[in-house]
Image: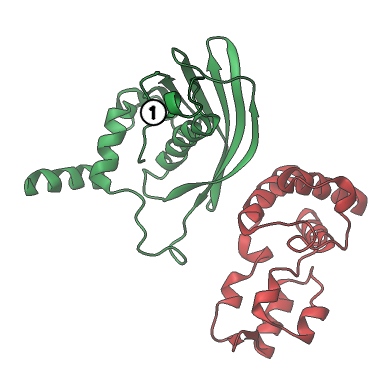
Amino acid sequence: MPSNEEVFEKVREALMDALGVDDDEVTPEATLVGDLGAESIDFLDIIFKVEKAFDIKIEREELFPEDVLSNAEYVQDGRVTEAGLAVLKERMPFADLTKFEENPIVQDFGNLLTVQDLCNYVSTKVA
Amino acid sequence: MRWFLIDRFTEFVSKQYAVAVRSISLSEEAVDEYVPGIPAYPSSLIVEGMAQTGGILCSQISDFEQRMVLAKIMKLKMNAEAVPGDLLTLRAELQTHTADGAVIRGVVHRGDFVLAEMQLMFAILDDDRFQNIQLFEPAGFCRMLRVLKLFNVGVKEDGTPIKIPEFMLEAEQAELSVG
C-alpha cells in the first residue's frame, strides 16, 4: 500500500497533467475547481489519470454525487437538506464537509473538493 | 459529421486502432483562404480529423449506439504544417474506454515524418442529462461510414468483419421506402 506521500505525489502529477498547473499550485488545501481551475470535463480526465496511476476503478458518483444534488428529496430551494447532508457524509467520508454544512448551497458544492480530499479518496481505494 | 476531415479508413480493428488517410488539396477553401497567399491546412482541422478517426473507433465499440463527443485535447504537438499535395495518415489507438468516455493516442504521419501527435478524450453523453439529443441521423451516419469504407476494412478483434448495425440498416431501408 502506498504511503500518503506517494499518493499525494501521484495525484499531484495527475492534476498537473490534466489541468496544466504548476507543482507548487497543487497543495493539499487547494480546491480543484476554485484554486486549480478544473472544469466539469476535466474531472473525467482526472479520473482517467488517477485510475491509471493507481490501477483502481473510480465510479464518478463516488467522487461527484450528482444524483444526490439533483434529487428533490435532498435539495430544497437550492440548498441541501439535513437528510441530503447525511447522505453526502455517508457517501463521501473522505471529504471534509464542515464548511459546506454551514451554508449548504448546491451551487457551491462543486468547489468543495480539495487535493487532500482526492488523496483521501484514493487511499481508501488502494487500501 | 458536417465535414469530412478524413477521406477513408485503410485499417480498423475494433477496440484497438484505426488508420485513416487524408489528402490535402489546394482546391479546398480552408487551405486556400486560411492565410491568403500561403496555402496551408489549418492545424485545428488535423485535430478534428483525428477526432473523427478516434471518435468512430470509440463509438464503434457500442455498435454506434452511444453518443460520443470530443471533450478535451489532452495533449497536442504539431511538428509542421500540412500543405497542398500532402497525403496524411492518421492513426488512432484506443488507450482507455469506460462507461463515461474514452481516450485515444493519435499520430499523424506525412510519409515517415511525424507531423502531429496528440491525445484526445471523448465523453459519452448520458441519457439522464442529454435526453432527446441525436447527434446523427442513423441513415445519414450509415451512409457516411460506408463512404469512409469503414465496413470494407473494419474487423473485430477476432478478425471477423464489422457488420453494419441493424438499426442503421433499418433506417436506410425506411429512408428508401419513403423515397
The colour one sees for chain A in the rendered image is: red
> Which residue is at the front of the view, B61 or B81?
B81
Foreground residue among B138 and A82: B138
Residue B17 lies left or right of residue A2; in this view the side is left
Q: Residue at x 70, y 43 (%)?
A: A52
Can you see residue B163?
no
Instruction: Say which amino acid is labelled 1.
Output: Glu
Is label 1 in a helix, a strand or a loop? helix
Question: What hue represents chain B?
Answer: green
> Which residue is painted at 61% across and 19% down in the image?
B80
Q: Residue at x 87, y 63 (%)?
A: A29
Report whether A83 appears left or right of B60: right
Direction top: furthest residue: B112
B87 displayed left or right of A66 = left
Q: What residue is pinned by disc 1?
A: B29
Question: Where, quadrant-wise, is the C terminus of chain A in this rendering?
Answer: bottom right
Compared to B99, does A91 lie above or below?
Answer: below
Q: Residue at x 25, y 36 (%)?
A: B143
Pointer 1 chain: B
